[in-house]
Image (spheres, rainbow, N blue to C red):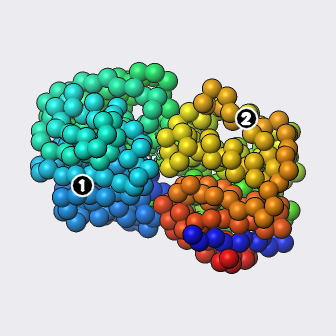
Amino acid sequence: MMQIKVTAPAQIHTTIQLPSSKSISNRALIINALGNRTFQLENLSDCDDTQVMIHALNDGKNTIDIMAAGTAMRFLTAYLSVTPGTRIITGTQRMQQRPIQVLVNALRELGAEIEYIINDGYPPLRITGHKLQKDTISLPGNVSSQYISALLMIAPILSNGLTLTLTGEIISRPYINLTLQLMNDFGARAKWLNEYQLKVEPQPYQSIPFYVESDWSAASYWYQIAALSNKAEIILPGLFETSYQGDSKVAEIFQLLGIESIYGNKTVTLKKTDKITERLDYDFINQPDLAQTFVVTCALMNIPFRFSGLQSLKIKETDRMAALIQEMGKLGYILHETDDRILSWEGERCEMTADVAIDTYEDHRMAMAFAPACVVMPEIRINNPQVVSKSYPYYWEDLKKAGFIIEEV
Ligand SMILES: O=C(O)C1=C[C@@H](OP(=O)(O)O)[C@@H](O)[C@H](O)C1
Ligand SMILES: C=C(OP(=O)(O)O)C(=O)O
């Protein structure tokens, strides 16, 4: 196992070129594959999750391994269901524990031919693609929005389009909106009919030049570094105030933690203010990927919190609720979990583990959210730091650029 020790500089003045959004990259790639494959996609992400998508779509292999990429697994399952040929789609051990039944059931109801190879409800899958006939479907919207995005993206090429009705509390809604936004940009006609129904017309995708913006979820770790530092000014090019990404909300929430976002010509500059909230209560139902960032930041800033809407964290790269409780415990913070969906901290402390090393559970966001802790500690050790490549391959290089010292131990 690899371990690194991370030490922070006294102050931070830096410009960081973030990775491109993997959510946008992976949508643009699927849409391109469903169109005539002539779109010019610029600035695609170089992260693992996008690389596996590019290989899946271009290599023509019968067995596709998407490793740990949830979006690739879900989007390709729908894509392969409408693409001639029989293929197996698989992923890491963890991917084989991340549920896909809601999507498979919906696709089967539309007429798709999909078999479970090992366990019912989970990858790997054997998929034989052909034309789908039905044009209306109802499915739960409270497990993963990626199932809904997957169905929406294939809908323009179905002969009668598709009307989707979502049941239960809809989670990660901004990601559904991101899908609609991209589909419409590429010439499709897709929209909400009301709070819980979506309609897509049978109208093919059109070719447009497309530039992928920087990743707002990745930006969250730089907001975190700025918030924990005594002195910091961080410039992030490639981010816009009006973004397609729901995680751009991070700017607003960090305002409560003393970080102001100043938007300039295709950049945002993070500056420190002294306006800091005494506690933070927030519902992360629409921004699940930001939860780890705020748990670590608030605790280390001594700001009690109650974060709700975290029910999807249990089925992500790891059970993120359990991982957060465990690793924050090592740092001396006692978190409480309620009803599988709330994490709270009211200031309760315990003794810090000697020689603490943070485990990352094959979860990029565990590594990226805990590393900034070294800003307020003498140092922090991170196990298996290479996990960051899932969404942000140059994370450690970027920290070095900002003056952090990273040593292999
Ligand atoms: O559609 C997407 O690009 C994503 C949707 C979210 O997943 P869920 O809908 O499963 O919450 C998010 O956590 C993931 O990182 C990316
Ligand atoms: C949950 C994530 O990704 P995915 O579900 O696409 O694997 C993530 O990047 O935090």
Q: Nearer the viewer, residue 235 or 247?
A: 247
Q: Quadrant of the C terminus?
A: bottom right
Task: Tell which of 269 and 257 is nearer to you.
Answer: 257
Residue type indicated by callout 2: His
Residue at 75% of width from left, 53% of height from top?
Answer: 330
Residue type at the position of mark 1: Ala
The residue at the point 34 percent across, 31 percent down is 102
Q: Report helix, strand or loop for mark 1.
A: helix
Front-lying residue, 290 or 62: 62
Instruction: Determine whether the residue tagged by mark 2 lies in a helix, strand or loop.
Output: strand
Q: Residues within 10 Å of mark 2 (few under 14, many from 20)?
A: some
Nearer to us: label 2 or label 1: 2
Q: Nearer the viewer, residue 58 or 316?
A: 316
Residue at the spot of label 1: 33
Image quarter of residue 181: top left
Is any part of residue 189 visible from this angle?
A: no
Residue located beneath label 2 in the image: 336
Examine the rendering and report whether any part of residue 44 can be seen: yes
In primary-sequence order, the first of circles 2 and 1 is: 1
* Callout 1 crowding tier (Cα within 10 Å): few <14, some 14–19, many ≥20: some
Question: Distance of mark 2 from mark 1, alpha carbons?
Answer: 44 Å
The percent coordinates of residue 165 (x first, y second) are 35, 23
Residue 198, by quadrant, is: top left
Looking at the image, residue 384 lies above or below residue 164: below
Q: Position of residue 151 (x, y in %)?
A: 30, 37
Residue 107 vertical position relative to residue 123 in the rendered view, above or below: above
